[in-house]
Image: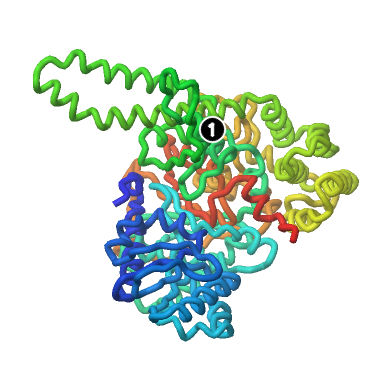
Amino acid sequence: MAAHLSYGRVNLNVLREAVRRELREFLDKCAGSKAIVWDEYLTGPFGLIAQYSLLKEHEVEKMFTLKGNRLPAADVKNIIFFVRPRLELMDIIAENVLSEDRRGPTRDFHILFVPRRSLLCEQRLKDLGVLGSFIHREEYSLDLIPFDGDLLSMESEGAFKECYLEGDQTSLYHAAKGLMTLQALYGTIPQIFGKGECARQVANMMIRMKREFTGSQNSIFPVFDNLLLLDRNVDLLTPLATQLTYEGLIDEIYGIQNSYVKLPPEKFAPKKQGDGGKDLPTEAKKLQLNSAEELYAEIRDKNFNAVGSVLSKKAKIISAAFEERHNAKTVGEIKQFVSQLPHMQAARGSLANHTSIAELIKDVTTSEDFFDKLTVEQEFMSGIDTDKVNDYIEDCIAQKHSLIKVLRLVCLQSVCNSGLKQKVLDYYKREILQTYGYEHILTLHNLEKAGLLKPQTGGRNNYPTIRKTLRLWMDDVNEQNPTDISYVYSGYAPLSVRLAQLLSRPGWRSIEEVLRILPGPHFEERQPLPTGLQKKRQPGENRVTLIFFLGGVTFAEIAALRFLSQLEDGGTEYVIATTKLMNGTSWIEALMEKPF
């Protein structure tokens, strides 16, 4: 059991157990010893639901990464390929299978597509002459993976690009399937709200799927009261800004992958006297970040400026606890101290790690360039000078700073001005292409198509109206003891989260005008419940809302939603689902065209 998944109002271990059971059943179909050949991208998400020990119990003896040519030698009866349905992977699999056939004793081959089987892929295997070699060809619908007690992700890296640039709705179908699985485990969600084109499509797919399964009535008492489906392109601004929560900054600077982060090892080397810094470790320090770690659960969603004081308070408490050993006189007292020792040592280790991480982040956040960049971002978000060429961005291009940093700033300016004046846009494009290379013209085209970097149409800037109506910019932010969600960006309240907050109270009718300005339709659907399953809420009991971000979500938005869940009189607790956990850098990267 992963205990941290059952802390919240919704026990996400139920979902984890369901997907583990399905995996066990598939492994047991392939009788005998097994080797798994992994599509490398899947190893991270799979690690969150099944450790190696579970695979070992089902006779998995070897594991390899999917690569061209021959497979490494393995004395096993079954070889199972775990892959995403991608054509280029089929070519590698065929190469592996053909070279195994030439090698000698026959093996049983099986293929497990995650999350769906694909006719195109099977046709490719057939064309390559290996389809008949596979005894089991199945799919493993790993749609939503539990990351934490209130967080689920599909980890579909191409979802935003597919939906908004290529018109490919595959990931929306997977989102709808994932929501149907959730409803099968946690009961029908009585009310669905949505904003955006993709949200509308997912709701339609869910309603259609429900009609197709009319045979069986869902008799589980509903855990969720509402579902809110939100398109990422309703709020293009939030991911472009630099996140200022502890977890958000770790992700911005080092990148969190499947709840793990890799950090420079020097800060974590045990300091020995007289070593003179020899033998520093070279391997990156890999840490898992989730709410199973008490200290991390406490500081992850705080503004970074409020983290230092928590760490120093913790240090005092821990050293006082260790001092207690001098006061333990009787055998009983000593025994009690010893029983608490493992917990205290874990707490000390956790504190040492987070103090080191905070020092690494502080080195970045106190730099002059970080301050300059943040100042420009905050000026744009509060509506200052968004309509002319920005000096700082010009300097960044002239000094050839990272292209992604430049693109994030230019896109932020464009979004905060409802598009740029044509001559400003042309100037930026020309400067970028001349400095970074003309191959990036395709990337600029993608950003325009996604609505991130575009000319202003109709000569009107709608952002000030949106900013004022939704109170997106707050001048006096209390970072230490926040009273509003704007603390996660030190002034800017994420538009997506503000929409969720206003839906919960007083309802979207109060902001009809702004909803019409934002892209895509807004809607409400009711799913009737059989009598006896209708929920009567006790006084003071909060509603539970599942909020699904189609196209990705940032850790700062997650922090803001957790803040709302913890409000005394908030009335709503949130569980967050998304197609991908992302930040501005990984988002822009996914939209960049790789030069051939």
Residue 170 at what x, y percent from top left? 57, 69
Query: Residue 270: which quarter of the image?
Result: top left
Q: Is residue 303 left or right of residue 242?
A: left
Q: Specify the quadrant that holds the C terminus.
A: bottom right
Of 562 and 219, nearer the camera is 562
Q: Is residue 256 left or right of residue 425?
A: left
Q: Residue at x 35, y 49 (%)?
A: 5
Q: Is residue 201 left or right of residue 15?
A: right
Q: Residue at x 63, y 62 (%)?
A: 197
Q: Residue at x 50, y 41 (%)?
A: 262
Of all residues shown, which one is farthest toward the right?
A: 423
In this view of the protein, can residue 104 be seen by the observer?
yes
Residue 272 at what x, y percent from top left? 41, 22
Task: Check disc 1 and report the residue beneath it.
Answer: 484
Query: Residue 370: which quarter of the image?
Result: top right
Query: Residue 524: which quarter of the image?
Result: bottom right
Of 424 and 362, nearer the camera is 362
Q: Residue at x 48, y 34 (%)?
A: 281
Question: Would you place residue 463 above or below residue 84 in this image?
Answer: above
At label 1, the amino acid type is: Asp
Residue 395 at what x, y percent from top left? 81, 33
Of 497 and 307, nearer the camera is 307
Of 315 and 561, nearer the camera is 315
What is the total number of numbered labels drawn onto the structure image? Answer: 1
Question: Would you place residue 467 above or below residue 83 in this image?
Answer: above
Residue 337 at what x, y percent from top left? 19, 24
In this view of the protein, can residue 18 be seen by the observer?
no
Question: Would you place residue 348 above or below residue 522 in this image?
Answer: above
Q: Secondary structure at mark 1?
A: loop
Question: Would you place residue 242 above or below residue 334 in this image?
Answer: below
